[in-house]
Amino acid sequence: MQLRMEFADASAYKSASQKIRVLTESWVQAWAYCPACGTSINKAPNNQPVLDFSCPNCGEGCELKSKKTSFGAKIVDGAYANLRYRSSTSW
Ligand SMILES: [Zn+2]
């Protein structure tokens, strides 16, 4: 796994949050593995609540959190009701 982030082309985006989303999604797609089984994960279709990546081997789902500054003690969850629903059903 390469820890250094490649700088994908995010010049089409103006906001910092959109740029970091594009950069981190590109890095995860290239280098991250499923936390459950270790298989390379795939980007989920857009607009899937609390699901950014999924594992083609075991079906585990992952949500990517990114921000332009350091993470603090809390990570804001934008869709708690959907996360609870997803947790009670299969990904
Ligand atoms: Zn997996």
Image: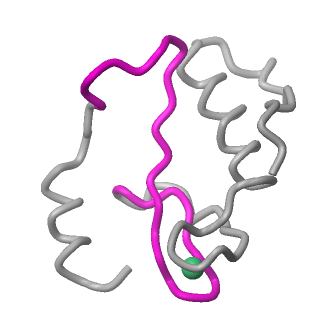
Residue at left 17%, top 50%?
80
* Of the pair 66 and 81, the residue shown nearer to us: 66
Location of the C terminus (image quadrant): bottom left
Vertical comparison of 32 with 41: above or below: above
Left or right: residue 69 versus residue 1 is left
Vertical comparison of 80 with 88: above or below: above
Residue at left 58%, top 25%?
18
Residue at left 23%, top 83%?
89
Please provide percent x and percent y for residue 55.
Answer: 59, 76
Left or right: residue 37 versus residue 69 is right
Q: What kind of secondary structure does the magenta stretch mostly adopt? A: loop
Would you identify the image quadrant in which residue 23 lies? top right
Please provide percent x and percent y for residue 74.
Answer: 25, 27
Please provide percent x and percent y for residue 6.
Answer: 86, 32
Highlighted range, magenta: 50-75
Please provide percent x and percent y for residue 90.
Answer: 32, 85
Would you identify the image quadrant in which residue 16 lies? top right
* Of the pair 85 and 69, the residue shown nearer to us: 69
Vertical comparison of 12 with 77: above or below: above
Q: Does the magenta stretch include residue 68?
A: yes
